[in-house]
């Protein structure tokens, strides 16, 4: 193999795409490994966000094989990055017809592309198709929750959050994502349960920050502020409970642990 290709591969593996590209650019078209080098050049250009140049190479290769899944995938990415929606939709239609209907990951790719392009009906369709193949496909459930957010469909978002609680593999950051979904749909009781559940995954300071987020969202949702009299303080847990009680009963003043409070 050409020494330039070997050196380029080393830089590529080190994620030094600028230097890798310099070596790959020195490989001539008559080199027997030139087609192999083009794939690396495309990846380098994509990583460097030079989408117009990457697209030029991709389309030159697609002329040889118009149904190459990887090239079509990258072509769609380039068009989206370049804000070329019509071209992206056209490439996506080809990609959609090329992939296997039994490949849950490719179906999810189609769903993600449609969501990025603002076609939420098709995005949801392909996401659901992926979930029909594997109901425990965590990434697809996450994607469905993002579609729900785009559609402002609280029921869908909450349902996805509940499903993720059952199947997520990363109990730390995975549950943090579920927490954010529950927060988005104002399921504050569920948020608090999730914070308790995450007790073994995060330190006390982080858990307190999660609780503070719940308190802030409660204030904004109820359009109120909680005031205490004097220098005394109450815990964030107590503050949250006062707001939740206010929401349920309308009690807007009183004392807690000897501290006077007023919600207004």
Image (cartoon, rainbow, N blue to C red):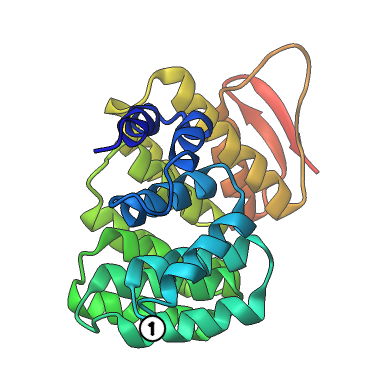
Depicted 125 relative to depicted 185: above or below: below
- Give the quarter of the image for residue 158: bottom left
Instruction: Count the labels in the image.
Output: 1
Relative placement, left or right, of 126 versus 137 is: right
In the image, residue 260 lies at what x, y percent? 71, 26
Residue at the image point whose x is 41% and y is 53% from the top = 38
- Give the quarter of the image for residue 9: top left
Residue at the far front in the pictured view: 30
In the image, residue 45 lies at what x, y percent? 53, 47
Density class for disc 1 (Cα within 10 Å; few <14, some 14-19, many ≥20) is many
Residue 185 visible from this viewpoint? no
- Give the quarter of the image for residue 105: bottom left
Residue at the image point whose x is 23% and y is 57% from the top = 166
Relative placement, left or right, of 220 versus 203 is: right
In the image, residue 221 lies at what x, y percent? 69, 54
In the image, residue 56 lies at what x, y percent? 57, 63
Image quadrant occupied by the N terminus: top left
Closest to the observer, 76 or 118: 76
The residue identified by callout 1 is 96
Closest to the observer, 80 or 174: 80
Q: Secondary structure at mark 1?
A: helix
Residue at the image point whose x is 60% and y is 66% from the top = 80
Closest to the observer, 201 or 45: 45
Residue 39 visible from this viewpoint? yes
Closest to the observer, 48 or 190: 48
Relative placement, left or right, of 52 versus 46 is: right
Relative placement, left or right, of 200 versus 243 is: left
Image quadrant occupied by the C terminus: top right
Residue at the image point whose x is 64% and y is 46% from the top = 217
Depicted 225 relative to depicted 153: above or below: above
């Amino acid at each position: 193999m050409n020494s330039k290709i070997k050196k380029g591969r080393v830089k590529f593996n080190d994620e030094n795409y600028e230097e890798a590209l310099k070596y790959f650019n020195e490989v001539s078209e008559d080199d027997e490994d030139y087609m192999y080098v083009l794939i690396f050049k495309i990846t380098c250009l994509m990583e460097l966000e030079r989408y117009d140049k990457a697209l030029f190479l991709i389309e030159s290769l697609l002329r040889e094989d118009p149904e190459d899944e990887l090239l079509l995938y990258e072509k769609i990415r380039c068009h989206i990055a370049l804000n070329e929606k019509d071209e992206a939709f056209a490439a996506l239609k080809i990609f959609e017809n090329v992939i296997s209907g039994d490949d849950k990951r490719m179906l999810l790719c189609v769903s993600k592309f449609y969501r990025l392009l603002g076609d939420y009906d098709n995005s949801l369709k392909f996401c659901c198709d992926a979930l029909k193949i594997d109901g425990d496909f965590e990434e697809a459930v996450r994607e469905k929750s993002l579609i729900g957010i785009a559609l402002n469909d609280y029921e869908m978002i909450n349902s996805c959050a509940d499903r993720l609680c059952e199947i997520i593999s990363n109990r730390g950051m995975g549950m943090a994502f579920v927490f954010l979904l529950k927060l988005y749909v104002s399921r504050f009781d569920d948020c608090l349960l999730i914070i308790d559940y995450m007790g073994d995954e995060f330190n006390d300071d982080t858990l307190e920050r999660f609780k503070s987020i719940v308190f802030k969202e409660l204030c904004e949702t109820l359009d109120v502020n909680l005031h205490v009299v004097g220098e005394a303080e109450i815990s964030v847990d107590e503050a949250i409970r006062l707001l939740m009680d206010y929401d349920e009963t309308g009690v807007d003043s009183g004392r807690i642990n000897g501290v006077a409070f007023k919600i207004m």
